[in-house]
Image (cartoon, helix red, strand yellow):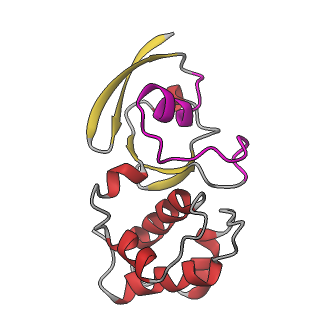
Amino acid sequence: MAILTLSINGTRRTVDVSPDTPLLWVLRDALGLTGTKFGCGQGLCGSCTVLINDKPVRSCVTTVGSIAGADILTIEGLSPTRSHPVQKAWIAEEVPQCGYCQPGQIMAAVALLKEKPHPSDAEIDDAMNGILCRCGTYRRIKKAVRRVAEEGGVR
């Protein structure tokens, strides 16, 4: 075990965990941030995607010891009132069905829109590729990303 200080959602948090613990379990079990979902545990489905220094990362395969000093943003850090532009677009376009993949989808969309405020369809497809939606709402996801770009982007 080790005492690690992490910057999560703009707040410094201290945890006493093994440095090889996956970030996902630190978020969910040690810090109670359960918005980030466990899907496959192998970094393949994308449900556990968070932003580390504004880049989408699979938290189930990222050890907490490897990200010391990084800025971590989870779904809870976007907006407690669901007023972030991507969250609003998700609601407006009725993207979620079961909702399980949505935290990962939303975080990947935020990263894309921060990097490319007006992405092409191919760039949207590329950025969202690998985040599996068992309900098949991919068209609505793309429509929501386009909506954010048309309405002024993300902050």
Residue 122 in the image, given as x and y percentages of width and height: 62, 84
Q: In which quarter of the view is residue 13 placed?
A: top left
Q: Residue at x 33, y 78 (%)?
A: 153
Q: Residue at x 42, y 73 (%)?
A: 113
Q: Is residue 36 magenta?
A: yes
Q: Is residue 134 left or right of residue 79?
A: right
Residue 144 drawn above or below residue 46? below
Residue 21 in the image, given as x and y percentages of width and height: 58, 24
Residue 7 in the image, given as x and y percentages of width and height: 33, 36
| Residue 95 vs residue 66, the one in the foreground | 95
Q: Which residues are magenta?
A: 20-44
Q: Residue at x 59, y 57 (%)?
A: 100
Residue 42 drawn above or below residue 124? above
Q: In which quarter of the view is residue 138 placed?
A: bottom right
Q: In which quarter of the view is residue 148 placed?
A: bottom left
Main secondary structure type of the part rendered in magenta: loop
Q: Residue at x 49, y 17 (%)?
A: 17
Residue 102 in the image, given as x and y percentages of width and height: 54, 62
| Residue 120 vs residue 42, the one in the foreground | 42
The C terminus lies in quadrant: bottom left
